[in-house]
Every structure is written in structure tokens, then in C-alpha cells.
Amino acid sequence: MNEEELQAKARELRSQGMGFGSIGKELGIPKSKAYKLAHDAEATPGGEAGFLDVIDRFQQVLTDYGVKDVQRVSEYVASQAADIFNSPQALRRALIDQMISPAKALSLTKMWASVEGLNIPQEMAAEAVGETGARQDRWSLIGSIPTRDLDGPYTWLQCLQLLQASQQPQGENGGVERVEAGDFLSAG
């Protein structure tokens, strides 16, 4: 493919919502070249150099915070949206997608916001308090197998509780015993 064909394909993939890292993988080119070919000049002030500087600063924040696989996390985050480094909510969600706990993702996002001079929306802090695990995905039980289901009626914890309850030993009456009122009086 020549340069013009690469650029046309990169812009087409970008218009479909694909991130720069994914475009690079698809076309077999570096992420920086994918950005150069596909980016919208208005989306990122400073052009390619500005974008790569942002990634370097973000990787430094990840390193300072102790994230183990800085390269993988930063590539994933950068591939999500052209303005992700200016959007605390999108940045936090991308970090959570990389299996970083919601609380740690919030701390990282706050650290990034302080480096970049961004404001953290109040509702984002409230959202972090409400989350207890990776993401509150929904689940269904198919037989005795928890299955991820966008419209599922249960959280992961509820699935585990239901499975545990179903494995409790049950007597002849399905685990229900008849209790007479007099039993309480004579127990004393």
C-alpha cells in the first residue's frame, strides 16, 4: 500500500471508532504513524509531537503510581479516543477496562488531572465510591454456570451467593422445617 492508500484506510478505520494503536496493528505500522495518517488536526492541538508528548507524560504518571505494564496500559488508553487525555471520565473508564481497580483508576485520573491541569467532575468521585469491584457487569445463571450478560439480573457477587445457597444441604422438606409455637416456649 502506498502512503495515500494507507492514509485513506487509516482515516476510514478511525471514522469507525478504532483507536490509533488498533489502526497501527491493523495496517502494520507504528501507532505514531497511524496517528499521523488518521488524526483530525483539530482534535489534538500540537499535532503528532504533542500527542506523543502526552503519551510520554501519561506513561510517567503510570510509572510513578506503580502500574506494572505501563506500555500495554498506555497503548490501550491512547487507542480509545483522540481526546481521552482531556476527558477524566473516559480516561478512568479505560483504566478500569485494563483491570485497574476503580479506586486506583480514580487516583491515577486525579494524578493525571493535576499534571495536565484538568478538572475532575464531582459525579466521578461519587461513582468511584459506589463501585466495589472491577466493573459491575451483569450476569445470568445458566444452569449452575455464571455467564456475562448485558441484561442479566445479577451482579457477580449475587451469582456466587445464589450458587452457594443452591449447594447447601437440604432435608426432606427442601430445607424447610415446620416449627410449632409451643417449641419456643419449651426451649427455655
Image (spheres, helix red, strand yellow):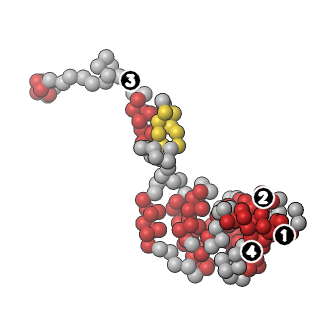
Q: Is residue 46 toward the left or the right of residue 94 in the image?
A: right
The residue under the point 76% across, 65% down is 10
Which comes sooner in the sequence, label 2 or label 1? 1
Q: Which mark is residue 52?
A: 4
Pointer 2: what residue? 25
Q: Secondary structure at mark 1?
A: helix
Task: Using the numbered discs, state the Cα–Cα distance from disc 2 to disc 1 in whole angstroms.
Answer: 18 Å
- Identify residue for label 3: 169
Q: Quadrant of residue 68?
A: bottom right
Q: Can residue 7 be seen by looking at this rendering?
A: yes
Give the Cα distance between marks 2 and 4.
17 Å
Q: Is 61 placed left or right of 4 in the picture?
A: left
Other residues around mark 3 within 10 Å, as few (<14) / some (14–19) / many (≥20): few
Residue drawn at x 41%, y 36% as measured from the top left: 162
Under mark 1, the amino acid is: Glu
Q: Mark 4 or mark 3, which is nearer the start of the sequence?
A: 4
Q: Amino acid at mark 3?
A: Pro
At 75% across and 62% down in the image, what residue appears? 23
